[in-house]
Amino acid sequence: MSRIRLHDLEFEPFIPEQELSDAISRVAGELEVKYADRRPLFIGVLNGAFFFAAELIKRLEIECEITFVKVASYHGTNSTGRVTDLIGLNERLTDRHVVVLEDIVDTGTTVRYIMDALKDHHPASISICTLLFKPDAYKQNIPIDHVAVRIPNDFVVGSGLDHDGLGRNLPGILRIIKNDT
Ligand code: 5GP
């Protein structure tokens, strides 16, 4: 695949589909060892994680469940002034082993919101598992337990990740071409 334009931005191939696939298989192997006989509940964070969730779960040969949520964040009346809801979470999490599936962890703000919201449901454990992780951008102290690929602090699309609605369908990962002129 060559360069591609999405709205106002140009992207170039970055991580080939095969490399991504191999990385997902490695993560699946880690999870199978960790969660055998624990019947984990995977929670995919929409929209971006649909691709990673599907690719990951089809590789798992352990007993597991999967559901999806959307994160809604709005100003409220609590002490921080911000309220976060996980829309679509209907499962009972008490004493369950929960694995959050993210498309990308950047500053970690979203992971922080999700962790805080999930803790209220008293699961036995919570792990974070992400397709892509930008360590140079990360500002939280929550461990990112399972990472398929670490990437530099560049804007990327493909395999579920979009630029203003476009690019989720592109295979592999593409990164932005920076125009320094
Ligand atoms: P956070 O900063 O909270 O870790 O990431 C917030 C959200 O920003 C991610 O869930 C993702 O939707 C979006 N995001 C961060 N970096 C990128 C990127 O490089 N590409 C795309 N498409 N979205 C990103």
Image: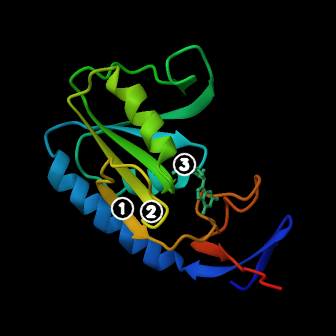
**Viewer-side residue, 35 vs 83:** 83
- Mark 1: which amino acid? Val
Tell me the SS state at disc 2: strand
The answer to whether 103 is drawn above or below residue 123 in the figure is: below
User: Is residue 181 toward the left or the right of residue 51 in the image?
Assistant: right
x and y percent of residue 92 in the render? Answer: 34, 18
Q: Is mark 2 within 8 Å of ligand 1?
A: no
Give left or right: position of 105 versus 4.
Answer: left
**Quadrant where the image shows the N terminus:** bottom right
Q: Nearer the viewer, mark 3 or mark 2?
A: 2
Percent coordinates x, y for residue 62 in the rendering: 22, 47
Mark 3 touches mark 2? (CB < 8 Å)? no
Q: Which residue is mark 2?
A: 133
Write down the residue under mark 1.
Answer: 147
Separation of marks 1 and 2 at Cα, in angstroms: 7 Å
- Residue 73 visible in rendering: yes
Say which residue appears at 52% left-offset and 32% top-offset: 69
Judge left or right: residue 175 versus residue 97.
right
N-terminal of the pair, mark 3 or mark 2, is 3
Q: Which amino acid lies under the numbered mark 2 shown in the image of this protein?
A: Phe
Query: Which residue lies at the image location 42% right of the left edge and 70% below the top edge?
Result: 150
Of the two numbered discs 1 and 2 in the rendering, the one whose residue sits closer to the viewer: 2
Q: Secondary structure at mark 1?
A: strand
How far separated are the C-alphas under marks 3 and 2?
A: 17 Å
Give the number of the disc on residue 50.
3
Q: Residue furthest front?
A: 79
The quadrant holding residue 158 is bottom right
Could you say which is closer to the camera, residue 121 or residue 110?
110
Q: Position of residue 136 (x, y in %)?
A: 46, 67
